Image (tube, rainbow, N blue to C red):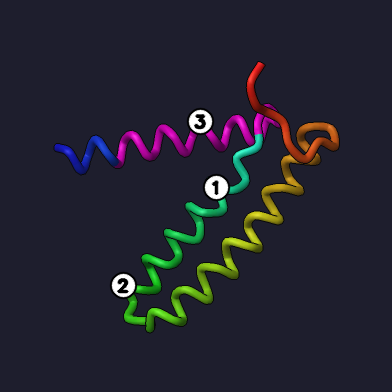
């Protein structure tokens, strides 16, 4: 039951952050890129790749996804690279 609750909470958080990011409300580029890198790293590790290969591939995916998500947010927010903070 605990594992199911964690999966449900993670899915809800992902949906919320993706919705805010795609609407241009608040940038979640690092979180989304990190999720992609961790998921790919876990899959590669479970497939039997070496740790060094997993780290290099995950870091490359993180960097590429971060740049992609930042550019997507800039287009959606009207050119702003960052929006958020305290009000």
- Name the chief secondary structure element in magenta: helix
Which residue matches tag 3?
Answer: 16
Residue 61, percent from left and from top: 58, 65
> At x 44% / y 34%, what residue is drawn?
13
* Residue 30 position (above or below residue 60): above
* Residue 72 position (above or below residue 5): below
Residue 79, percent from left and from top: 85, 37
Q: Is residue 87 left or right of residue 38?
A: right
Which residue matches tag 1?
Answer: 32
Furthest-top residue in this view:
87
Q: Residues within 10 Å of mark 2 (few under 14, many from 20)?
A: few
The one nearer the camera, 52 or 11, is: 52
Mark 3 vs 1: CB contact within 8 A: no
Q: Earlier in the sequence, mark 3 or mark 1?
A: 3
Which residue matches tag 2?
Answer: 46
Identify the secondary structure beneath mark 3.
helix
Furthest-right residue in this view:
79
Q: Which picture quadrant has residue 84?
A: top right
Q: Does the magenta stretch include residue 21?
A: yes
Identify the secondary structure beneath mark 2.
helix
> At x 61% / y 30%, what residue is drawn?
20
- Find the distance from the CA under tag 3 to the CA under tag 1: 11 Å
Q: Which of marks 2 and 3 is nearer the N terminus?
A: 3
> At x 63% / y 21%, what residue is drawn?
86
Stretch in magenta: 7-26
Q: Is residue 36 left or right of residue 28?
A: left
Mark 2 vs 3: CB contact within 8 A: no
Identify the secondary structure beneath mark 1.
helix
């Amino acid at each position: 039951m605990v594992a199911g609750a964690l999966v449900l909470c993670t899915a809800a958080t992902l949906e919320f952050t993706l919705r805010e990011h795609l609407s241009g409300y608040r940038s979640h580029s690092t979180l989304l890129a990190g999720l992609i890198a961790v998921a790919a790293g876990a899959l590669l590790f479970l497939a039997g790749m070496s740790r060094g290969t997993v780290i290099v591939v995950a870091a490359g995916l993180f960097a590429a996804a971060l740049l992609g998500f930042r550019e997507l947010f800039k287009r959606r927010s009207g050119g702003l690279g960052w929006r958020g903070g305290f009000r």
